[in-house]
Image: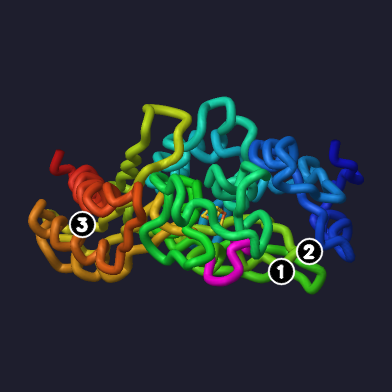
Amino acid sequence: MIQFQFERASTVKASVNAMVNNGNARFIAGGTNLVDLMKRNVMTPTKLVDINAVPLKDIQQKNGVISIGALALNSQVADNKIIQEKYPLLSKALNAGASAQIRNMATVGGNIMQRTRCSYFYDTTLPCNKRQPGSGCGALDGLNRMHAIFGTSKDCIAVHPSDMCVALVALDATVVVAGPKGERRIPFEEFHRLPGSQPAKDNTLQNNEMIISVEIPDNEFNKNAHYFKVRDRASYAFALISVAAALNMDGKVIKEARLAMGGVAHKPWRLKEAEKSLVGKQATEEVFKQAAEIAMQGAKAYKYNAFKLKLGPNVIVEALKNAAGLV
Ligand code: SF4
C-alpha cells in the first residue's frame, strides 16, 4: 500500500502553496487516471492535493475567447450550448473519448494531464523509460500496435491518449497555469512535449504549477468541423488514429483550415503544412488526398503499427470530407 499525505485546498493560491517543496506531490480532481496509476504502483505520490473545491468550473466568453475552467467536467463542456454552437469540434472530440461515466468525473485539466496508456508503462515488471528512466523501452521491439509514427525517439514511442487535446491543438487553444510567481500562458502546441531523451516528462508544466483554465480564441470553424476517431471498438477505447478537421469556407472554397491527429505521437499532432495546402482550394476529395499525403510525410512505423501509415491518410480524407459536407 502507498502511504501519502492528503490535503484539501479551496483556492488556487492554497493549491499552489501545497505543492511547494514537494516534487512528488500531485493534484487530484476526478482521479480517473491518477487513481488507476496509483493502484498499480506506476505513480507513487507522497502527497495528494484535492482541488475539487477550487472554483474553476466556469465556462465563460470574454474578450474574444472562451475560457473553460480546469475543473469543468468533460461532459459539462461537451454539453455546453456555447461550445456546441461555436466550438463543435471540441464537443465532438470530448464525446468520442472514454465513456459517459468517465466523462462525468474527468476534468479538463485532468484530461490534459492524463498519461499514456502504453501497456509497458502500466506494468511495473516490464522496462519503461517513462516510468523508470534508464530501464529501456519495452514497446520499441515489443507490442507496439498502438504506438507513435511521428516524433518518436529511441527512448520512447508512446502516444498521448486524449481526444479533447487533439481538438484543442487544432483550435489554437492556450493553457493558463498558475504557479508561485503568478500566472503564465502556454500555447497548446507547446504544452505537451516529444519524448526525446526524457520520456518521463510529458509536458512543459513545472512541478508546482497548476492548470487553471483553457482559452480558445473566437473562430469561424463552427459550420464545418468534424472529429473522426478510428478505434478497436465503438466506445471506451483509445484512438488507433483520430483526426480533428475544421474548415472556414466561402462556398466551396477553403479560406482557412485546421487539422490535427491523435494516436500518432507523444503529443497531439498539428498538421500545419497540410492546412496550408488546403487554403484557397476547392473542397474536393482530390485536394484532401493531396493534403493527407503532405500530412503523412516523415511518418515512421514500427513492427506492429505499419497499418497506421495507410490508415492515417484515409482518416484525414474522411474527416475533411465530413467537415466539408461531402458525405
Ligand atoms: Fe515506456 Fe514510452 Fe517505451 Fe511505452 S513507449 S514502454 S511509455 S518508454
Q: Specify whether 195 is left or right of 245.
A: right
| Nearer-N-terminus badge (3/2) | 2
Query: Nearer the observer, disc 3 or disc 2?
Result: 2
Q: Which residue is mark 2?
A: 208
- The residue carrying mark 2 has its beta carbon less than 8 Å from ligand 1: no
Disc 1 marks which amino acid? Glu
Q: Which residue is mark 3?
A: 249
State if disc 3 and disc 1 touch (CB < 8 Å). no
Please name the predominant secondary structure of the magenta segment in the image: loop
Q: Residue at x 80, y 41 (%)?
A: 53
Query: Nearer the observer, disc 1 or disc 3?
Result: 1
State if disc 2 and disc 3 touch (CB < 8 Å). no
Q: Which residue is mark 1?
A: 183
**What is the spatial separation of the Cα atoms under label 3 and label 2, in whole angstroms?**
43 Å
Q: Residue at x 59, y 49 (%)?
A: 115
Q: Specify whether 71 is left or right of 138.
A: right
Q: Residue at x 33, y 39 (%)?
A: 230
| Nearer-N-terminus badge (2/1) | 1
Q: Residues within 10 Å of mark 2 (few under 14, many from 20)?
A: many
Disc 3 marks which amino acid? Met
Q: Specify whether 125 is left or right of 87.
A: right
Q: Position of residue 28 (x, y in %)?
A: 75, 44
Q: Provide the secondary structure element on which disc 1 rests.
A: strand
